[in-house]
Amino acid sequence: QKEVEQNSGPLSVPEGAIASLNCTYSDRGSQSFFWYRQYSGKSPELIMSIYSNGDKEDGRFTAQLNKASQYVSLLIRDSQPSDSATYLCAVRRDSSYKLIFGSGTRLLVRP
Amino acid sequence: EAQVTQNPRYLITVTGKKLTVTCSQNMNHEYMSWYRQDPGLGLRQIYYSMNVEVTDKGDVPEGYKVSRKEKRNFPLILESPSPNQTSLYFCASNSGSLGEQYFGPGTRLTVT
C-alpha cells in the first residue's frame, strides 16, 4: 500500500463545475497536509495547506481534512481551463521535515 | 523575492561525465531536498539536508551525492551519470516541520 494514494485520473469536468480531488494516507501520525498544482514540465506550486480537521477555504479552493478517515480532499469551485494540471497531495509525518507525495491526479477542465 | 533557484535548467550530457546541478534559496530555510520526477513514478526524494553539514539519503540516493557547506546552497552531484538518471530534477526547501515546502523551477537532465 502506498503511503499517499491518489486516483491518477484524468478527472474531466466542464468549465464552471466543481472539481473534487481526493487523497488518502496511511500514517495516522501525519500532521500536515498540502496540495500542490503542477503544470506539465513545471515545478509543483503550493495551493493549500491544512493542519486540522475540517475545511479551509482560499478563494475558489477548499481543502478538507478528516484525520479519523485519513482522508484529505481539494475542491475547486468554478473550474477554469487554466486549472487543468496535475494536483499532488503531500503529507508530512509528525515531527518530520519530509513530505510524502502522492502520484497526482490529472485534472482536465473542458471549455 | 523569496525563491529557490536551480541551474542549469536544461542539460544534455554523456554517460560518465561528472556534472553538478546547483540549488540556492534565499529564505534562510534549514531543510532542503532534491527530488527526481519520472512519468508514472511521481516525485521521489533523492537526498535531504536538515542544516549545514547535515545530509541524509532519501528514497533513491544511488548514483548521487550532495553537500551542504552553506545554508543557502545544496548542490546535487552526479559523479558518473548514466542514462537511467535522465529525469526532471527539483530542489526544494522549507523552514521547519510545519513549514511549507517551496520548489525550484526544475532541471531537465538527459544522459545519452
Image (cartoon, coloured by chain):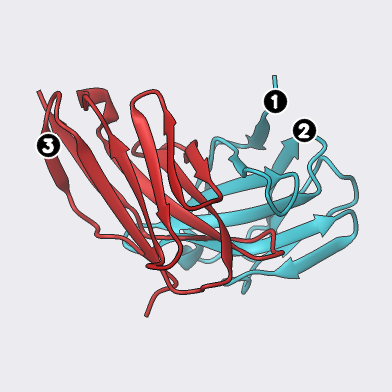
Q: Quadrant of residue A74?
A: top left
Q: State the residue in front, A87 or A92.
A: A92
**Residue at the outermost bottom position:** A1
At a point 63% along the width and 46% down the height, the residue shown is: B92
Disc 3 chain ID: A
- What crowding class fits label 1: few (fewer than 14 Cα within 10 Å), some (14-19), or many (20 or more)? few
Q: Relative to B73, say whether B86 is above or below.
A: below
Can residue B112 be seen from the camera position used here? no
Label 2 is placed on what type of residue?
Met
Identify the residue position indicated by label 2 in the image.
B27
Distance from disc 2 to disc 1, alpha carbons, whole Å, reads 6 Å
User: In the rendered picture, chain A carries what hue?
Assistant: red
**Secondary element at image label 3:** strand
Identify the residue position indicated by label 3 in the image.
A13
Is the residue at mark 3 from the same chain as the one at mark 1? Answer: no
**Secondary element at image label 1:** loop
Q: Which mark identifies residue B2?
A: 1
Q: Are marks 2 and 1 in contact (CB under 8 Å)?
A: yes
